[in-house]
Amino acid sequence: MQYTQPSWGGEQDSPPPPKPFTLVQHNCLGSWDVFLSLFGSFTQLALIPSVVALQDPPVYRGKLPSFNSFTVFSPPPDRGCKPCVAFYVYNSFLATVSLLPRFFGRGDVMALDLFTPEGFFNPSTTGFTIINSYSTKGRLNNTRSVPPDIIFPVSPLPTLTLGDLNIHHPTADPLRVFKEDEIATSSPYFDRATELGFSLLNVPGVFTRFSMSLIGRPGVIDLAFACPLLAPYFTEWTDPLPSTGSDHIPILLRFEAPLFRAPPPTPNWALTDWPTLESSLKATSISPVPPIATTLSMDIWFRTNLDRITAELALHTPVKRVTFRSKPWWTDLLSQLRRAYNSALRSSKVDRFNAALLASARAARAAYFKAIKKAKRDHWSAFLATATPQTVWTAKKFAVGRPPPRLPELPGSTTPPELNKALLNHFFPGDPVSTPNSILLPYTDCPALVAEEISRALARSSPSSAPGPDMTPNSVWKRVHRVAPHLIQDLLSPLVAHGFHPSALLRFTLLLPRYRAIANLL
């Protein structure tokens, strides 16, 4: 089976950022069928993994199987014992790096030292180490065959440690009921990892092994750790591949530079089509309040009307699609130089023996890339020259990069509220408490909400404050109120009159002095 992967080289006029580094980890149970099923499933991935780390691979007469487009590295047979770990490196990736396999005089652990002068995630990260181990029951009670100091070494290079460690620990499996010997066995490993600053990459509670017997419990024993130098580049721990027939799941690890993680699309409010939007907002009206106001009906009524307004705003506002290829430093001069360079390059390819055309292409190329470097320097210098105490942290973010996410992405949870709910349900399970759908009675002595009060509340709000979950900043709500003052007034008046706080109000950032419930949530 032949796999193809996009070239790691970039275009001549704009070198692309480093490709994400992906690695697959799996225990093959010594089965050829599991091995072939694993490598056959790589066609379902958008990017072929650069490295495949296997534990208990199939071995025949002391040799491991080969697979097209991959090169295998494994410990040499030791005293007649077969190798228990192996690395399969994708040939397209292998052609771009220098690789040094390291062995420890045993077949259950090995390491790969990878080097490249261009850097893996940034120019300073020219190398890192991957340690693959298959730890089984040791000779003594509460021990494993591979000691912690081998799995977690002290190294100046970024280090990734992974493997089937056959240990159970509350950090990896918080809901498991542990035995004393399980804690005694796993504690030396996690204590050593904590001492050296290694971070567990597994999603807590996601099982990596399912016993084939009816009495065995599932567990989290296929573990991955990253040292402090590598942890900032870790982005994803997932199990997207189908079952291979093993009782272990295939695990995909992904690493990439924080600077090249494209932010999610957000509305570009500076380009809102206000002339068209203003007429649409004036024609929009809030639906009547339900005849019988209950907590459920009022919540649905508020959410429906708020969604109508925000959808109208989004309809007339383009979306920012910032990627790692966005170039705020680009100028018209660079466009002209690029056209000149491409033209000279095409001419030189027509007649490759014309020395004048070749010299012209080289001169155009040198001028083009020299202008790019100058434009970058000038843009960065201008940005720093105009930096204020409020924007100095933005400069730091551009120079250092975004920090990695501190919480993993749990299955089925993509937004912060979903992640919060998943964590609460996971660590604090309990019987759901249903909110009674009670009838709301209006307050007869409550003064009516007028447009002037809303205008004063909006005037006190900062236009530069971060928008709420609906991504609508205060500056937009100010203009909406100037254009169609009836919208916000008709939307909030029933809530004030009934003293009700709907759940969707978390998405609305307006602060009214009389409505203190809103203030408590801002």
Image: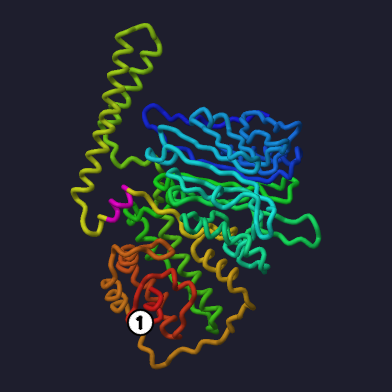
Which one is in front, 490 or 368? 368
The reply to whether residue 300 is in sight is: yes
Q: Number of labelled discs?
A: 1
The residue at the far bottom in this view is: 445
Residue identifier under label 1? 449
**Residue drawn where x is 38% and y is 89% of the image:** 446
Residue most extreme to the top: 353
Secondary structure predominantly adopted by residues drawn in magenta = helix
Q: Up-down: is 138 above or below 474?
A: above
Q: Residue at x 32, y 53 (%)?
A: 270
* Residue extent of the magenta highlight: 393-399
Q: Position of residue 208 (x, y in %)?
A: 66, 54
Give the camera-side residue of 193 and 283: 193
On screen, residue 309 above or below 359: below
Quarter of the rendering containing residue 422: bottom right
Give whichever of 512, 383 is nearer the camera: 383
**Looking at the picture, how far across and down is residue 185, in whole percent?**
63, 60
Amino acid under label 1? Leu
Residue drawn at the location 39% of the way across and 52% of the way down? 402
Q: How is the image coloured?
A: rainbow
What is the quadrant of the N terminus in the image? top right
